[in-house]
Amino acid sequence: MNLRRLGAAIGPVAGLVAVYAVFALFGPSSFSTAANLETIARQTAIVGAAALGATLVIVAGGIDLSIGSIVACGTVVVAGLLAAGVPPFLAAAGGVAAGLLFGAINGLLVTRLRVGPFIVTLGTLLVIRGLAKGLAHEQKIDAPMTWLGDLLAQLSPERRWLLLPPGVWMVIVLAVGVACLLRLSTFGRSAVATGSNEEAARLSGIPVNAIKLGVYVLGGGFAGLAGVFQFSRLTVGDPTVATGLELDVIAAVVIGGGSLAGGEGSVLGSLVGALIMTTIRSGCSQMGLANWIQEIVTGGIIVGAVALDRLRRREGRGRGGA
């Protein structure tokens, strides 16, 4: 591992430690409690699950602005299926399947229409959000209580041996799988090559369109899973939830070392980036800061993450030229 990669790996972790230290020192004592750390982990699971798929999309040179809408639609699908008497596991599978379908639509529009992914997913952001509201008749869908509500629920005393809620462990296991897919599989290496230089990848025999379609399908599936987790926290289907979540997810990926130009990304870094975003929100909330201040802080982080991405690219080109 060269110094640049080592710095990219250590940087997000150091940033997380610094952010946590600031709130631990200047925030209320409740911020550093085990209960609050568990809450941060539960909240991170939603952004983290979506960030796993977004990492693949961004590595391949794409972008997906419809993530928040897919999450919202996922909660509606899960709640609607449960209300109709469908078993919880199949209801959760339905939420993930909806995400896979939307991801496939995004991928097909990008590859077949040859329209920029920013424009395509900006459009599907509105389409999917509207579909979610239509399915829910523009209101929340109540669902019967099932074990799905326990995925990200606070651990009861008899379940403390788990240390973290089941949903958090699911994200950790899936993260290992995605990291292996990205670094060890032909598909992952092809995604990196596509994001680094699409034309060179095509000339090398890589099926670029199939790779793009694949990452968007996976990205949609992980957003659907995030929808299942969001439902677990809300226990209702809410078509208005997760507005702006896509910005948190994209910022998490970029903070973690991903490049909006494609070709670079880290699963571990994306999860650390998600933790940073959640920790800042939790710290601001614990300190009693107004929502508008939290929004300014979050917006500043997103701008800083993009600026950091540009700086990394400029330094990379400088070393390449040298």
Image: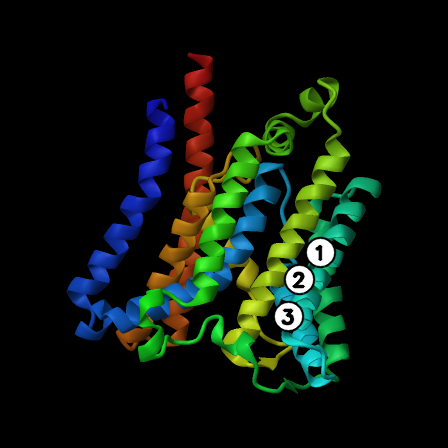
Q: Amino acid at mark 1?
A: Leu
The image quarter containing residue 205 is: top right
> Which mark identifies residue 89?
3
Q: CA distance from mark 3 to mark 2?
A: 11 Å
Q: Which residue is mark 2?
A: 96
* In front: label 3 or label 2: 3
- The answer to whether residue 250 shows anywhere in this view is no
Q: CA distance from mark 2 to mark 1?
A: 6 Å
- At x 33% / y 77%, what residue is drawn? 158
- The answer to whether residue 254 shows anywhere in this view is yes
- At x 67% / y 86%, what residue is drawn? 139
Q: Amino acid at mark 2?
A: Val
The reply to whether the C-beta atoms of the residues labelled 2 and 1 are less than 8 Å apart is yes
Taking 172 as reference, is 5 above or below it?
Answer: above
Taking 241 as reference, is 250 above or below it?
Answer: above
Quadrant of the frame with the N terminus: top left
Taking 185 as reference, is 31 above or below it?
Answer: below
Q: Earlier in the sequence, mark 3 or mark 1?
A: 3
Q: Which residue is mark 1?
A: 100
* SS for dot 2: helix
